[in-house]
Amino acid sequence: MKLLKKLAAATAVSFAMMGAAQAATVLNDWVLNPNGTGGAAAGQTVNEYLDINGNAFIQITPTSGTTFNFAEHGVFNSLQADSNGQPFSSNFGGKFLTATFDAYGTGTFGGGFSFTGGTISIYTSTSYGGTNGVYGANTGTLIATFDVMVGGGGVVDASGSPINNGQVSILAKATSPDGLKAGYFFGADGTDLSTSDLLSFAFTNANTVKSPTGTLVSEVACQYAGFTGPGCGSGTYANSSTAFFVSNNGQFKLAEVPEPGSLALFGIAMLGAGVVSRKRAAKKAA
């Protein structure tokens, strides 16, 4: 109990310090132009975040009786910003944002999990959910690529599945000059952000999808993730303890890259939060 209190206190301090750091670095009133033409003046202001929704297929490989490795492949879209009810497609000739997400990491059954690497690829598109490309999520113009950084994650149940409506966090980085394509992302002052190094913070709620559609299975599990179990070639797909679908909805934010010390502090805070979450989960189970 004393150790838990110390970790909780350290985490609280870390988050408090990082809160001050991120308040200065998270981008507000930046501009997104899905058409990539006309500069910032032809774009739409994003006060704080992009709304994101999607599905992911997760495969778990136990590494011991208590630990596992995992691989996650997901498809997402963003139809609006700041939950403002103003669809991008209405203002930009039917275009909105789509994305593919592939990542991997480690976890503890009945405890926490964290990411160790991966990629987020963002596109402008006019379709999503079909059979072109990967579920229609990568058929448009690639406008951003983020590398998933070590950390983030969430809490899982005894089978390794994210707890229902549990929050999952992802930290990623886009490095100039290839991270962001010119003409799509702009700062509040109109500066093209393609010349900058940026972080992205994604926060989503995860829920198990009990009956994924046939298209979702064939596109994301079979094609994108390379799954070869039932539902991919033969048999009928069904979630199992080692392969399952989750739905995600949440927010995607951009931030300036902080000082190395601040970024390290963020990692310590995430680690402390993960330990506290695992302790709480274990206490509830008992």
Image (cartoon, rainbow, N blue to C red):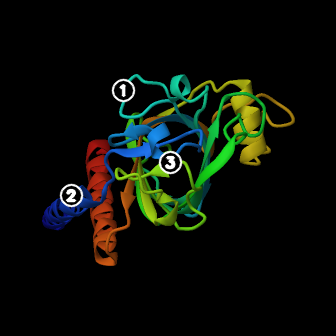
Q: Quadrant of the C terminus?
A: top left
Q: Nearer the viewer, mark 2 or mark 3?
A: 2
Q: Residue 257 location, x and y as percent?
A: 38, 67
Asked whether disc 3 touches disc 1, contact meaning CB atoms under 8 Å apart, the reply is: no
**Image coordinates for residue 4, horizontal then vertical, percent:** 19, 62
User: Callout 3, which amino acid?
Assistant: Gly
Which residue is found at the position 61% from the left and 50% from the top?
143
Which corner quadrant of the image does residue 279 belong to? bottom left
Q: Residues within 10 Å of mark 2 (few under 14, many from 20)?
A: few
Three-letter code, disc 2: Gly
Say whether residue 265 is left or right of residue 96. left
Residue 92, image quadrant: top right
Disc 3/disc 1 C-alpha distance (Å): 35 Å
Residue at the (31%, 50%) spot, across then down: 282
The kind of residue tagged 1 is: Asn
Residue indicated by mark 2:
19
Q: Mark 2 or 1 closer to N-term?
A: 2
The residue wearing badge 1 is 84
Q: Which residue is mark 3?
A: 160
Label 2 close to label 3 by CB (< 8 Å): no
Q: Nearer the viewer, mark 2 or mark 1?
A: 1
Q: Relative to 41, is 103 on the left or the right?
A: right
Depth check, front residue: 286 or 254:
254
The one of 205 and 137 positioned closer to us in this rendering: 137
Residue placed furthest toward the bottom:
261
Counting residues from the N terminus, which is met first, the one under dot 2 or under dot 3? 2
